[in-house]
Amino acid sequence: MSNRIVLNTISYHGAGAIKEIPGEIERRGYTKVFVCSDPDLVKFGVTAKVTGLLDEAGIAWELYSEIKPNPTIQNVQDGVKAFAASGADCIVTVGGGSAMDTAKAIGVIVENPEFADVRSLEGVAPTKKHAVFTIAVPTTAGTAAEVTINYVITDVEKVRKFVCVDTNDAPEVAVVDPEMMATMPAGLTASTGMDALTHAIEGYTTKAAWELTDMFHLKAIELIAKNLRDAVAEAKSGVPGSGREGMALAQYIAGMGFSNVGLGIDHAMAHTLSAHYDTPHGVACAMLLPIAMEFNKPVVAERLADVAVAMGVDTAGMTTDEAADAAIAAVRQLSEDVNIPKVCEAIKADELDQIADDALADACYPGNPREADHDTVVELFKQIMA
Ligand SMILES: NC(=O)c1ccc[n+]([C@@H]2O[C@H](COP(=O)([O-])OP(=O)(O)OC[C@H]3O[C@@H](n4cnc5c(N)ncnc54)[C@H](O)[C@@H]3O)[C@@H](O)[C@H]2O)c1
Ligand SMILES: [Fe+2]
């Protein structure tokens, strides 16, 4: 059996990296950019940091920003129409996972119009052509959608989120500039950072994990444990520092890993919470993380012991079991320190059966190292109920 790694062709990292964007467009001869962002980022002037550079370089662009958090099929279909009307020949997406995922789906459908219904892209989509040339600029430090081969879309009608996996959606260029994340409030810094930690821990314990992805995941865990508290403190004080820079890099490294091996039950359950209750993705992942680790411990205790070491826990003298427990405790402590809520008030007791079924049907569930049945998933959800 062979293993596959898919990454961006080019990625830029560090403060001021967005200055590279005009050159990457010009040297390929593109003439008009479809800028895919979201309404708040436009309002806060974050999108303008990139469009200002396009203006300076004399590159034409048109904005599409009808995108909500947990983006919908409608957001994608409207975007496909807007792309066609714009006359653009490339995409620059500026945003969190929601804007970047929508841009990926738009870029794929423009080149593969037989998937215009969007639903048919679920799972491993058999598209033939690579998406429209895309430069992805993350404004949150969490999803790593700028490097992954996944995107997640909400089907409002069927009350579910679905994951699309397609090597044709990987943005050619990623520009990971911590200054683009500077306006994130503390709560968003915390929840998106915990999403990145969930990617790294689920990616490290997922069934398909192997040496190359282990390397990415352990480094990401180490960087997140070192930097997330500082990044949240910097967001609160408004004083920039190394925490935000560390998180920008850490979340990308986690993406280099999990994109290539998959995730597990935490993400399967988190997608379901977002579909039913519009729970922000990072918050859902973070609340469930220690619970999912506890559930998986019987089959991945050694791996969780490695997680403890990566998080800086001194495990000398501990048994494997104790070290695995220490990893779970370290995650709980980090969540508490960055004020992640412990309960999801929105969950309704009479919907538990439905959300458990939906979680087990999610594309992330098969990667989980331990099998769960319906009743077990109900019990796991109950742990975050008010
Ligand atoms: N493609 C992938 O591999 C992947 C991985 C994980 C999650 N996801 C998906 O990504 C989505 C979540 O993305 P997200 O957590 O990045 O949040 P998001 O994109 O949904 O953004 C949440 C809110 O934060 C605001 N925001 C973003 N950046 C900001 C900034 N710099 N300053 C101020 N406000 C800012 C946005 O305007 C929005 O209102 C979910 O739909 C999730 O399923 C995708
Ligand atoms: Fe995630």
Image (cartoon, rainbow, N blue to C red):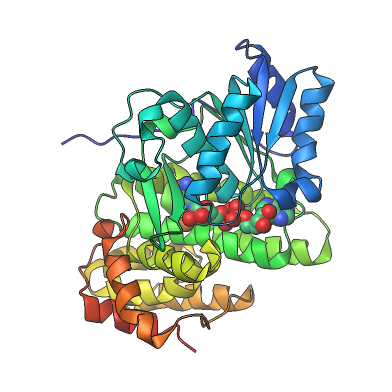
Judging depth in this view, the residue of 259 and 216 nearest the camera is 259
Residue 75 image position (x, y, % from top left)? 55, 46
Q: From this viewpoint, is residue 221 visible?
A: no
Tell me what residue is drawn at x 68 percent, y 38 percent: 14
Tell me what residue is drawn at x 56 percent, y 65 percent: 280
- Ligand 1 shows up in the quarter that is bottom right
Tell me what residue is drawn at x 44 percent, y 24 percent: 111
Q: Tell me the quarter of the picture where residue 371 sits.
A: bottom left
Judging depth in this view, the residue of 254 and 381 nearest the camera is 381
Residue 131 image position (x, y, % from top left)? 46, 27
Tell me what residue is drawn at x 72 percent, y 25 percent: 61
Decide if residue 347 is on the left or right side of residue 362. right
Residue 367 image position (x, y, % from top left)? 27, 56
Judging depth in this view, the residue of 254 and 88 nearest the camera is 88
Decide if residue 357 is on the left or right side of residue 101. left
Residue 356 image position (x, y, % from top left)? 31, 74
Q: Is residue 124 above or below residue 302?
A: above
Decide if residue 49 is on the left or right side of residue 246. right
For the N terminus, give its image quadrant: top left
Q: How many marks?
A: 0
Q: From this viewpoint, is residue 74 visible?
A: yes
